[in-house]
Image (cartoon, rainbow, N blue to C red):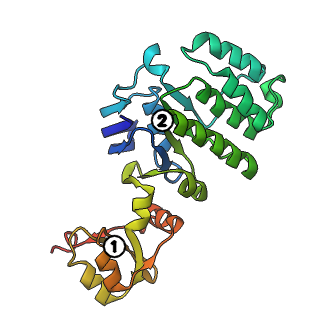
Amino acid sequence: MGITVEQVTKTFRSKAALKSISFEIPDGSIAALIGENGAGKSTLLHILAALQRPDSGKIEIDGSPPSQQQKWLSKIGFVDQEASIMASMSLKRHSGVARSINVKWNEEFLLSALEELSIPTDCPAKVLSGGQRQAAATLLAVAKEPKTLLLDEPLAALDPLMRRTLLGILLAYAYDNKVTVLLSTHLLSDIERTCDHIVLLKHGTVTLSQRTEQIIDCHRWVPNLAENKNFLTQKQETSFFEIGGNLLVCSDNEALFEQMGAKSASFEEIILARMGDLFQPKTAAAEGR
C-alpha cells in the first residue's frame, strides 16, 4: 500500500511549510525526497513519522494513518538528521535496550552490518565519528524490521565508501523484505542509481512525483528559439521551461521529440532545472490556447 499523502498542509505561525501537497509512493519503492534547504522535507518526514500533526489533509502509510500507538510505530523506522543515539551507550547496549522495547528486533542483521561498515560496537557512541553515528542510527532503525523506513538525510555525513556500503545494505534489505523507503538527500548521483521514485518539494509544494525512469524519459532539450516555443505552446499535455539558451521540454509524446530533434537530458540536469526559481512551466493553457 505504500505511502499516500492527500492535500496535506502545515503552517508554523504565519509561514506555510507544506501547502496542500499530494503524492503517492507505491509499496516496496525506494523513493527520494528532494528539495532545497527549507523546502519542507524534514517537516514532511516528521509528519509521516507521527512526530508532528498536519493542519489538514490525509495520510496513510501501509493503509493506516500516522499514530503514536505501539502497533503502528512498530511498523515504522525513522531517523532524523541529528542521528539521535545516546552518547554514553555503546551500540551493543543500544541493541539490548531496543530489543526489550520493540516488537521485532534483528540483532544479527545489526551487528553484521556494523561489522561490514567497521563501526565499533563496544565503545561509547560519543567516540564515534559523525558519519559512524549517522550510519549506526540508520541501521538501528532497520533492525526493528519496519514495513516503512523514513530517513532524513541519512547519507549526508558519510564518506563516499561508507555511503556506498550503507546504501548497498539498505537496498538489499529493502528489496528482500519489500520495505518502502523514503529518504531525503541532496546526492543526485546516488538517487539516480538507487531510487525508483522521486518526490520533488519546492517552497512547500510538490512539483514532481514520478518514477525515476519516467522522469528521464519525458524530458528533452531543444534550442530556445521562437519557432520552437510557438510550436510547443500549441501542443496539449506538453510543457516547456526556458533554461538559458535551451528549452527543457516535458512530454510523453516521443514522436514530438523526434520531430524536433530533441536531445537527451541527464537526471541531474532535469532535477537541478526543476528546482530552480526560474523554472516556470509554459503550456498551451498558460498561453491561453
Please determine whether, in this image, residue 112 is positioned above or below residue 32: above
Picture coordinates of residue 12 (x, y %)?
42, 36
Residue that sits furthest to the top in the current view: 100
Q: Quadrant of the N terminus?
A: top left
Picture layout, residue 275 above or below residue 4: below
Q: Is residue 240 left or right of residue 120?
A: left
Query: In the rendered view of the protein, which quadrant contains the C terminus?
Result: bottom left
Amino acid type of the residue that numbered disc 2 sits on in the rendered structure:
Lys
Q: Label 1 is placed on what type of residue?
A: Phe
- Check residue 240 in the rendering and tell me which mark sits there, or answer none: 1
Q: Which of 182 and 50 is in front in this view?
A: 182
Q: Which of marks 1 and 2 is nearer the N terminus?
A: 2
> Would you say 257 lies left or right of 40 here?
left
Question: What's the mark number on residue 17?
Answer: none
Badge 2: how crowded within 10 Å, few (<14), some, or many (20+)? some
Marker count (numbered): 2
Query: Could you say where residue 281 lies in the image, as x and y percent from the top left?
Result: 32, 68
Q: Using the image, determine if residue 27 lies above or below residue 208.
A: above
As helix, strand or loop, the secondary structure at mark 2 comes to loop
Specify whether 193 is left or right of 228: right
Q: Name the residue under label 2.
A: 178
Nearest to the eye among marks 1 and 2: give it.
Answer: 2
Residue under the point 73% across and 30% down = 112
Q: Which residue ends up furthest to the left in the rendered image?
A: 289
Q: Residue at x 75, y 50 (%)?
A: 161
Asked if one can make out residue 85 in the rendered structure from this viewpoint, the answer is no
Quarter holding residue 219: bottom left
